[in-house]
Image (cartoon, rainbow, N blue to C red):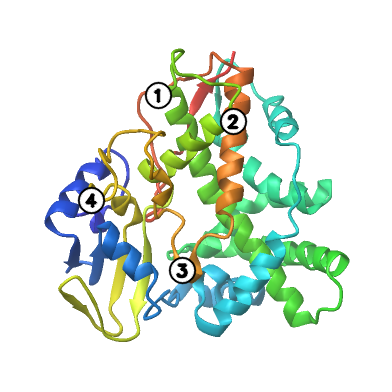
Amino acid sequence: MNSSTILSWDNIDHKAIYTRQLADNPIYWDPNLNIWVAYNYEYCKAILMNDAAIVPEPVIEADSLLNENAKLAIKKLARITNNMQHQESRAAAIMMFQCIKPVQINELIDSLLGKVNLTQFDFVTAIAKQLPVLIILKGMGFNVDDCAFVTENIAVLVRIMSPNKSAADVIAINSVIDDFYAIAKRYVNEKLNGYNEASITLFAVNLLGLLIQSYDAGRGLLCNSLINLVRHCDDSNKQLADKAYFKIGVIETLRLDPPVHHTKRKAVEDFRIGEQLIKPGELIMVVMAAANLDPAVFKDPEEYDPLRNNNDQHLTFGLGGHNCLAKYLTIDLATDVCSYLANKYPAIGILQHEFKYEALLNVRLVKELLIKLA
């Protein structure tokens, strides 16, 4: 079984698959999915940096049933556009990102924890699905009602990115997207002056993109960082007063156990990866999570080692024009959460031996993470 055909993360040793493919098939043609799959670091990096490898256009039949505001998101999100349109969308996303100001994360955590039983609760539901979104909304100055609407409906809004929307998904998206745009456009009109309707819409779309990324990748990193913290941080090596200790742990988690495992590209002209010729129109799956385990780059790659001297060379955030805008915000968020929880609740524990994962192909997200703080 190859990683390109992993259809469920449950009961799958994905690291063993990646390790085998790194050794045997660093660039591999998957005949079942009709796609090239790149595993090793050199090849993944080359593809991500190659202008001839673009993000594939979404081709999703269910999208025809979405309303016009929902279709706008698919057409104008920076993460799924190319060329001049991508530059415009990315500039809008950067503008939205620059509106985020620092917030008191500890206060937000305490507020969320005040709603749960600290002897046993689901970290995913209580913290990870809410906190990253709230950090953006609070940091941008959205009011209480708007924050409540977005956090209550973000799980619906992220389905815009799903390649296999059900009829129920379409109905749910259409029921909330108009209200979201009304909130986002009102914010843009209040905070940013002098833009026409088209620009305001572009800002609103890419604010949605930031929130979608924070909901998926943000919660994945929070959960994986906390799991590694508890598993690997014993009393002999805790440096609880030093936030840098937690930061290097988060960065090593991004390398060893990232939430996002792969992304896709499409060739628009001939180019070679290793000895393989990639032809125009052919799809390529770039498995960054496998590249992060490449022994040619990382010594003892399957070891959790925050002190390794090059763990920040991981490819989890991508490279080139589509690299993640919020990478530093995401790292700082996970660092602050782990540091705060470890200092305030030194007896933190995980109440599970095994985890179930969401039915998503490119991201590996824990469904439930039962922990105790008291």
Residue 96 occupies which quadrant of the picture?
Answer: bottom right
Three-letter code for the amino acid on which mark 2 is drawn: Lys
Residue on which the image places disc 1 = 232
> How many numbered marks are there?
4
Q: How crowded is mark 1: few (under 14 residues within 10 Å), some or many (20 or more)?
A: some
Q: Which of marks 3 and 1 is nearer the N terminus?
A: 1
Tell me the CA gap for discs 2 and 4.
30 Å
Instruction: Tell me, yes or no, whether the two marked residues, 2 and 4, touch with CB atoms within 8 Å.
Output: no
Residue on which the image places disc 4 = 296
Tell me the CA gap for discs 3 and 1.
33 Å
Tell me the CA gap for discs 2 and 1.
16 Å
Q: How crowded is mark 2: few (under 14 residues within 10 Å), some or many (20 or more)?
A: some
Tell me the CA gap for discs 2 and 3.
29 Å
Q: What element carries label 1?
A: helix
Tell me the CA gap for discs 3 and 4.
22 Å
Q: How crowded is mark 4: few (under 14 residues within 10 Å), some or many (20 or more)?
A: few
Residue on which the image places disc 3 = 320
On the image, the x and y values in percent for residue 137 come to 74, 51
Q: Which of marks 2 and 3 is nearer the N terminus?
A: 2
Q: Which mark is residue 243?
A: 2
Q: What element carries label 3?
A: helix
Q: In this view, does 20 lie to the left or right of 3?
A: left
Mark 2, mark 1: which one is toward the viewer? 2
Residue 26 occupies which quadrant of the picture?
Answer: bottom left
